[in-house]
C-alpha cells in the first residue's frame, strides 16, 4: 500500500531550517484532454520563490526543489494518475512523489519547515485498503483496493456444474453432489480471502454476490473475518466489472459515513466517564505525544479546526508550547490551506504526524458538525494514564 508507506516516511521527516515544499495537484485532464495544473504551478512557484532573499541558502534550496519538481511534472506523471502529491527539500535530502488514481479536489502549494500531510492523510483515510469479494457458486474474484485503485486481484474458480433433468432419488443425489461442489468452492474462496487479509493487513471487506452465495459466504467465514465485513451487496456477478466495483465501493463509503457518529460518540462518552476518550486539540495532542491514541478523529474541513492560538489562554498553554514548537520557517500557502489560519494548518499536520508516528488510525469525519463543539478533534484511546 504505497500511500500508507509514503505517509509513514514523510511523518518521520524532522522539521528543517530550509523550505519544505508540499504540492498537491489535480491531474485530471480538462475538457480538451490536456492537463490543467501547469498554469498554477508556474504562477505559484514564481510567487513563492520571491519570498526568500536572492542568494540565501533557503532560496538556493527552494530553487533546486522547484526545478526538480518541474522536471518531474513534465516527464514522470503516469497517465492513470488523477492526483499527484510532491514533497521536496533538497537541503534535507527529501523528494517523495505520490501518484494516485484517487482525485485531489484542488491544487495546493504549501511551503513550511515540514511536509504538509493533512491532505495526504485525508486521501488515505477516504480510500483505505479494502478487499472486495465478487462471487457466485462457481467462481470468485478477490480484489484489493488502496488509495482509490486496485492494487491486486486473485481469481478462485470452482467446478462448473449444470442442472440435471433426472428425477427421483437420482436427482436428489445429484443435487447433494452439486451442493458439495458449491460448498467446497466457498470454502476455497474464504481460505483465499483470509490469506489476503492477513498478508495485506486489510481492515475492511465488502462481499458481493447473488442470493445463493451470500448466505454460504456468511456461514463459512470465521468470526474475525465477519467482523471486517462492512456490507453484503446483492448483485449478479455477470454485470459489468466497473458497475460491480462501483456499487461495492459505494457501499463501503456509506458504511464509513454511518459509523462516524458512533466513533465520535465513543470518544465523547469515554471523555465524559473519564475513560478511553479525549476531546479537543489540547488533550488530543497530549494523548498523541504519550502514545495513548488508538484512533484520531479529525474534521475533514481544515477551517473547522480550532487554531492553537485560541488555546493560548488555557492553563496548559505552556505544556502545549512544548508539544508544538514554533515553526522554523513561517508557512507560505496557496490554494485551500491559504484560506485557513496558519496555526490551523500546523495543528493539523502535528496531529496527523504524531498519529502516523505512533501507528494510530486516522479517521477524517466528513460531517464536520459532529466535532464542531470540540475544536474539530477527538480521539479514542488505547489506554488510560
Image (cartoon, rainbow, N blue to C red):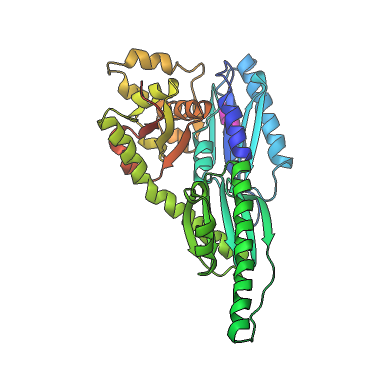
* Secondary structure mostly taken by the magenta-highlighted segment of the chain: helix
Q: In which quarter of the image is the C terminus?
A: top left
Which is more toward the observer, 295 or 73?
Answer: 295
Quick check: can you spot residue 167?
Answer: yes
Residue at (57, 17) in percent of width and height: 16
Indicate left or right for 288 with 140 as reference.
Answer: left
Residue 206 on image: x %, y %: 52, 55
**Rendered-image quadrant of the N terminus:** top right
Residue 302: x, y in percent? Answer: 41, 36
Q: Does the magenta stretch include residue 46?
A: yes
Question: In which image quadrant can residue 200 be found?
Answer: top right
Q: Residue at x 61, y 58 (%)?
A: 187
Q: Please say whether residue 71 is one of the residues in the magenta stretch.
A: no
Q: Which residue lies furthest to the right in this view?
A: 75
Compare residues 20 and 141 and report the one nearer the observer.
141
Task: Give how far across and how far down residue 67 sits, in percent.
Answer: 69, 30
> Which quadrant holds residue 288?
top left
In the depicted view, which residue is nearer to us: 299 or 203? 203
Q: Where is residue 328 in the image (x, y as percent from the top left)?
A: 51, 16
Q: Give 20 or 324, whichever is nearer the viewer.
A: 324
Find the magenta span and give its range: 44-48
Amino acid at each position: 500500500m504505497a500511500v500508507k508507506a509514503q505517509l509513514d516516511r514523510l511523518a518521520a521527516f524532522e522539521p528543517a531550517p530550509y523550505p519544505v515544499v508540499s504540492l498537491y495537484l489535480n491531474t485530471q485532464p480538462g475538457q480538451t484532454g490536456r492537463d490543467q495544473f501547469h498554469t498554477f504551478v508556474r504562477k505559484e512557484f514564481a510567487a513563492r520563490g520571491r519570498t526568500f532573499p536572492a542568494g540565501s541558502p533557503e532560496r538556493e534550496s527552494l530553487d533546486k526543489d522547484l526545478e526538480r519538481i518541474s522536471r518531474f511534472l513534465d516527464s514522470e506523471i503516469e497517465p492513470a494518475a488523477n492526483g499527484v502529491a510532491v514533497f521536496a527539500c533538497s537541503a534535507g535530502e527529501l523528494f517523495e512523489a505520490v501518484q494516485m488514481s484517487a482525485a485531489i479536489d484542488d491544487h495546493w502549494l504549501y511551503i513550511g519547515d515540514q511536509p504538509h500531510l493533512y491532505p495526504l492523510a485525508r486521501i488515505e483515510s477516504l480510500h483505505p485498503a479494502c478487499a472486495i469479494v465478487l462471487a457466485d457458486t462457481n467462481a470468485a474474484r478477490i480484489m484489493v483496493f488502496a488509495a482509490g485503485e486496485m492494487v491486486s486481484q486473485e481469481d478462485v474458480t470452482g467446478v462448473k456444474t449444470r442442472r440435471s433433468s433426472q428425477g427421483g432419488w437420482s436427482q436428489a443425489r445429484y443435487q447433494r453432489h452439486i451442493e458439495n461442489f458449491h460448498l467446497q468452492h466457498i470454502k476455497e474462496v474464504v481460505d483465499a480471502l483470509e490469506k489476503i487479509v492477513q498478508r495485506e493487513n486489510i481492515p475492511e471487506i465488502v462481499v458481493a454476490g447473488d442470493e445463493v452465495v451470500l448466505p454460504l459466504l456468511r456461514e463459512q467465514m470465521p468470526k474475525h473475518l465477519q467482523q471486517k465485513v462492512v456490507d453484503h451487496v446483492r448483485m449478479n456477478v455477470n454485470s459489468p466489472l466497473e458497475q460491480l466495483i462501483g456499487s461495492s465501493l459505494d457501499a463501503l463509503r456509506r458504511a464509513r459515513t454511518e459509523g462516524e457518529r458512533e466513533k465520535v460518540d465513543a470518544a465523547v462518552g469515554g471523555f465524559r466517564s473519564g475513560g478511553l476518550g479525549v476531546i479537543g486539540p489540547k488533550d488530543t495532542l497530549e494523548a498523541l505525544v504519550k502514545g495513548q491514541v488508538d484512533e484520531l478523529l479529525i474534521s475533514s474541513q481544515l477551517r473547522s479546526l480550532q487554531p492553537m492560538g485560541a488555546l493560548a489562554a488555557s492553563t496548559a498553554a505552556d505544556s502545549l508550547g512544548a508539544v508544538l514548537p514554533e515553526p522554523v520557517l513561517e508557512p507560505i500557502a496557496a490554494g485551500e490551506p491559504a484560506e485557513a489560519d496558519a496555526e490551523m494548518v500546523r495543528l493539523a499536520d502535528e496531529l496527523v504526524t504524531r498519529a502516523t508516528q505512533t501507528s494510530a488510525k486516522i479517521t477524517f469525519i466528513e460531517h464536520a458538525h459532529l466535532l464542531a463543539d470540540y475544536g474539530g478533534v477527538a480521539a479514542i484511546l488505547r489506554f488510560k494514564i
